[in-house]
Image (cartoon, rainbow, N blue to C red):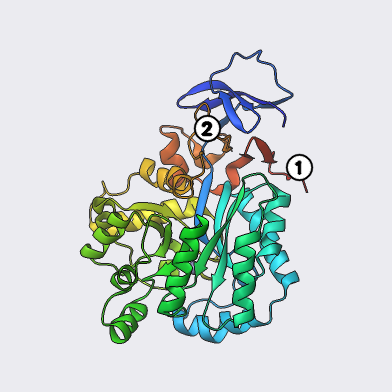
């Protein structure tokens, strides 16, 4: 691993020379004559933490624009599921490749995935140098043999990247996975020390069906089953009440808020202020491209902030710096990645954004511009694990 020196880059309000040694930040205020194998001219750019996308379905890039502007249930049963039944492993490979390229171009270095044929996605993540938590998806519709294969894979897979990729146990949702399998997934995740990734309370229909079938709401149902714990990453959590936010906070569950997907599918509004005040760990996800229709975490920050302000009628709710933390540090922390902030000793994940673009001028406030004004095309360079994944918007390793 080569050392990298990034010279004259704007960091914490002043021009700095940032030295990366191996996988970690060595000195974030190095002398300009510091020695390194590779030097990047950071003049006219700012260094920011990159994005950690905590909920997506990468290969669903293949469904971009395939079915828009319809109710979630119809969208899922009449379009998404029939399309997916025809997808081959080769399709998933190409969908994952498209997703990974798009994510890197938009400044993302990590995603938590939930899909099928995971080996294809793992290969692409390895090739492009990103980080990922790849979900082994469990659904009742899968055969016993398929499930046994997944368990075997979870138990015996070895990360070929030396720490950039982990697996997660991913029961799809309470309406596709029964109580026994939910508990089995929970036990498996705990035994293997893995995260458990699940959709929770995404729509009102899910909550109403749960009330009818189980006599309670999804969060209370999962809690009764003993599934909720600090290893759980719950995507959406749109329809939750005050007591449920307290339960989620008490169990240490990570919430993956997906504002664009929730608005596009008209699922409802995540109660950000209530969840934040309850002490929940809140991260950001894009969800799949089929309901977004991109993987742009910068857009998620802006949507999250604007929706939370509008819903609470309080402009102080979810300020720009908090949106950035949610999309960066909170996501890294939730998955135990020692990164997400630019600091000496931390894993060297960073992006360089161009400040000469019209959307970044004038530069009264960098984070405000990045969250509210910019677009992701100003991401010039992406660094992950001390390695350059993109420079001048080009992929050096592909
Ligand atoms: Zn999803």
The location of residue 279, given as percent across then percent down, is 27, 50
Label 2: which secondary element: loop
Separation of marks 1 and 2 at Cα, in angstroms = 24 Å
- For mark 1, does the 10 Å Cα neighbourhood hold few (<14), some (14 to 19), or many (20 or more) residues? few
Determine the image quadrant of residue 254. bottom left
Pointer 1 and pointer 2: residues touching (CB < 8 Å)?
Answer: no
Q: Taking the image as drawn, is residue 162 in sight?
A: yes
| Above or below for 216 versus 8 | below
User: As drawn, is 89 to the left or to the right of 79?
Assistant: right
- For mark 2, does the 10 Å Cα neighbourhood hold few (<14), some (14 to 19), or many (20 or more) residues? some
Q: Is mark 1 within 8 Å of ligand 1?
A: no
**Residue pictured at 49% horizontal, 40% vertical:** 340
Q: Taking the image as drawn, is residue 292 in sight?
A: no
| Above or below for 1 versus 373 | above
Label 1: which secondary element: loop
| Above or below for 288 versus 47 | below
The location of residue 82, given as percent across then percent down, is 61, 84
**Residue pictured at 31% horizontal, 53% vertical:** 280
User: As drawn, is 305 to the left or to the right of 176?
Assistant: left
Which numbered disc covers residue 346? 2
The location of residue 52, given as percent across then percent down, is 51, 49
**Residue pictured at 37% horizontal, 43% vertical:** 320
> Can you identify the residue that label 1 sits on?
396
Which badge, 1 or 2, comes first in the chain's sequence?
2
| Above or below for 103 versus 212 | above
Q: Nearer the viewer, residue 122 or 353?
A: 122
Q: Nearer the viewer, residue 378 or 395?
A: 395
Determine the image quadrant of residue 268. bottom left
Camera-nearest label, 1 or 2: 2
Which numbered disc covers residue 352? none
Quadrant where the N terminus sits is top right
Q: Nearer the viewer, residue 220 or 259?
A: 220
């Amino acid at each position: 691993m080569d050392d990298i020196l990034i010279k004259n880059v704007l960091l914490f309000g002043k021009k700095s020379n940032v030295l990366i040694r191996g996988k970690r930040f060595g000195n974030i205020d190095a002398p300009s004559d510091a020695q390194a194998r590779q030097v990047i001219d950071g003049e006219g750019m700012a260094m920011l933490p990159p994005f950690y996308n905590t909920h997506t379905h990468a290969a669903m890039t293949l469904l971009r624009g395939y079915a828009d502007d319809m109710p979630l249930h119809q969208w899922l049963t009449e379009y998404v599921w029939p399309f997916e039944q025809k997808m081959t492993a080769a399709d998933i490979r190409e969908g994952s490749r498209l997703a990974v390229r798009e994510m890197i171009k938009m400044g993302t270095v990590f995603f938590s995935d939930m899909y099928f044929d995971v080996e294809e996605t793992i290969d692409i993540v390895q090739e492009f140098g990103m980080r990922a938590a790849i979900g082994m998806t469990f659904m009742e519709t899968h055969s016993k043999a398929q499930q046994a294969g997944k368990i075997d894979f979870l138990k015996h897979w070895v990360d070929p990247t030396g720490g950039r990729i982990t697996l997660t146990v991913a029961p799809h949702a309470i309406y596709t996975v029964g109580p026994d399998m939910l508990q089995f997934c929970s036990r498996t995740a705990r035994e293997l020390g893995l995260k458990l990734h699940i959709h929770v309370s995404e729509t009102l229909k899910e909550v109403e069906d749960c009330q009818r079938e189980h006599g309670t709401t999804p969060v209370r149902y999962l809690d009764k089953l003993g599934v909720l714990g600090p290893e759980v990453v719950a995507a959406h959590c749109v329809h939750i009440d005050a007591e449920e936010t307290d339960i989620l906070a008490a169990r240490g569950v990570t919430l993956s808020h997906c504002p664009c997907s929730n608005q596009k599918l008209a699922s409802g509004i995540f109660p950000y202020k209530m969840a934040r005040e309850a002490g929940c760990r809140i991260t950001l996800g894009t969800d799949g491209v089929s309901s977004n229709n991109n993987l742009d975490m910068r857009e998620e920050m802006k949507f999250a902030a604007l929706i939370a302000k509008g819903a609470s009628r309080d402009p102080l709710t979810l300020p720009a710096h908090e949106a950035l933390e949610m999309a960066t540090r909170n996501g890294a922390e939730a998955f135990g990645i020692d990164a997400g902030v630019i600091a000496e000793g931390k894993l060297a994940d960073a992006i360089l954004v161009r400040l000469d673009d019209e959307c970044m001028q004038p530069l009264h406030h960098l984070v405000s511009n990045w969250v509210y004004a910019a677009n992701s095309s100003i991401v010039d360079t992406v660094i992950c694990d001390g390695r350059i994944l993109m420079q001048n918007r080009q992929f050096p390793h592909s």
